[in-house]
């Protein structure tokens, strides 16, 4: 008997899963997802439930639920940065020349 082998095609990621999937506004979606991830990590680290987190961030509990589930269409990048400020975090924006041979983009480093 011969073993049947299935070949799986592997494609290297560009570093932006949203762009890899061909979604519009992929750069914005990646930035929002990284900011939301930081926010949820800080909420968890502080041991806050959704109601407590909502009070800290100045929103209703349903917004925290949306945030935790990655439903980020209702949140602007600016609003997510304000949430980080409310969680006692500075948000630092740096403007620099794009790397040679690469397209300019918005990056989130934490």
Image (spheres, grey):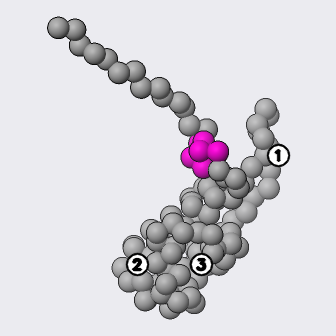
Closer to the chain start, of discs 2 and 3, is: 2
Query: In whole angstroms, how far apart are the C-alphas of marks 2 and 3?
Result: 14 Å
Q: Nearer the viewer, mark 2 or mark 3?
A: 3
Q: Residue at x 59, y 44 (%)?
A: 21
Q: For the view shown, which residue lies furthest in the top direction?
A: 1
Q: Which residue is mark 3?
A: 83
Q: Is residue 18 magenta?
A: yes
Q: Residue at x 58, y 65 (%)?
A: 35
Q: Answer few, some or many: residues within 10 Å of disc 1's Cα (few below 14, many 20 plus, some between 14 and 19).
A: few
Q: For the view shown, which residue lies furthest in the right direction?
A: 97
Q: For the view shown, which residue lies furthest in the left direction?
A: 1
Report whether residue 81 is seen.
no
Residue 60 is situated, as x and y percent measured from the top left of the image, at: 52, 89
Nearest the viewer among 31 and 23 is 23
Report whether residue 7 is seen.
yes
Determine which of the numbered discs, if any, sits on residue 97 in the image. Answer: 1
Q: Secondary structure at mark 3?
A: helix
**What residue span does the magenta drawing correspond to?**
15-22
Q: Which residue is mark 2?
A: 46
Q: Residue at x 39, y 73 (%)?
A: 45
Q: Answer few, some or many: residues within 10 Å of disc 2's Cα (few below 14, many 20 plus, some between 14 and 19).
A: few
Q: Secondary structure at mark 2?
A: helix
Image quadrant where one finds the N terminus: top left
Q: Is residue 41 left or right of residue 97?
A: left
Q: Secondary structure at mark 1?
A: loop
Q: Is residue 92 magenta?
A: no
Quarter of image, res 87: bottom right
Check the image and report above or below for 11 versus 64: above
Check the image and report above or below for 58 versus 4: below
Q: Residue at x 59, y 75 (%)?
A: 84
Residue 4 is situated, as x and y percent measured from the top left of the image, at: 28, 16
């Amino acid at each position: 008997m011969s073993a049947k082998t299935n070949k799986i095609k592997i494609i290297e990621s560009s570093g932006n899963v949203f762009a890899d999937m061909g979604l519009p506004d992929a750069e914005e979606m990646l930035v929002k997802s990284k900011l939301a991830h930081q926010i949820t990590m800080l909420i968890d680290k502080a041991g806050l439930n959704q109601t407590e987190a909502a009070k800290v961030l100045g929103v209703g509990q349903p917004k925290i639920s949306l945030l935790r589930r990655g439903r980020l269409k209702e949140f602007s990048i600016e609003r997510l940065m304000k949430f980080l400020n409310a969680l006692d975090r500075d948000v630092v924006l740096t403007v620099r020349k794009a790397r040679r041979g690469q397209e300019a983009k918005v990056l989130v480093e934490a």
